[in-house]
Amino acid sequence: MAAERFAEHVIPGRWDDARQPSASEMKKTMFIAVDMEEASAKVRDHGVGDDLEDMDAAVWAGLVPLKLTPGVPVQDEVQTKEVALPGYVKTYHR
C-alpha cells in the first residue's frame, strides 16, 4: 500500500506502531508517483558567489540558510494513556 511505503520512508518503524488509516480516510487520500528525468540544485559550501557587476543593483543579495533538525518530541496533551516514547521517535533523523 502506498500509504505504508510513504510513512516508512519518512519515519521507518512508524507504520506498524500507528493507527492504520480507515477506509474513509484512504478514500480522501491520493498518492502519486512522478518519474523525474532530471533535476537541479544549487549547492554552496561557502558564502555568496554573486557577480561583482550585480552588486550595484537595487536587489537584495545573499542567502538564506535552511536547516531541518528534529526538536524534542512533544506527546499529544489530549492523550490520557501513558505510552513510552518509541525508539523510532527517540532516534529520528533525516
Image (cartoon, grey):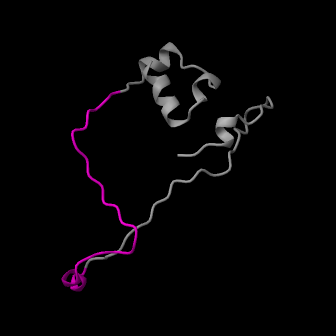
Q: Residue at x 26, y 52 (%)?
A: 40
Q: Residue furthest bottom?
A: 56
Majority secondary structure in the magenta region: loop
Indicate whether 62 appears above or below 36: below
- On the image, the x and y values in percent for residue 3 come to 46, 24
From this view, report whether residue 86 is shown above or below residue 46: above
- Image coordinates of residue 79 in percent, x first then y, are 74, 32
Magenta segment: does it hold 56?
A: yes
Residue at the extreme left of the image, as rendered? 53
Return the x and y of residue 78 as percentages of the image width and height: 72, 35
Residue 15 quadrant? top right
Name the residue at the top extreme. Answer: 23
* Residue at the image position 18 percent from the left and 84 percent from the top: 53
Residue 56 lies in quadrant: bottom left
**Relative to 64, does residue 74 appear above or below in the rendering?**
above
Q: Quadrant of residue 36?
A: top left
Question: Residue at (51%, 54%) from the top-left corner?
Answer: 68
User: Left or right of 75: which side holds 19?
Assistant: left
Identify the image quadrant of the N terminus: top left
The image shows a total of numbered marks equal to 0
The magenta stretch is 32-58
Most extreme residue toward the front is 45
Q: Residue at x 26, y 33 (%)?
A: 35
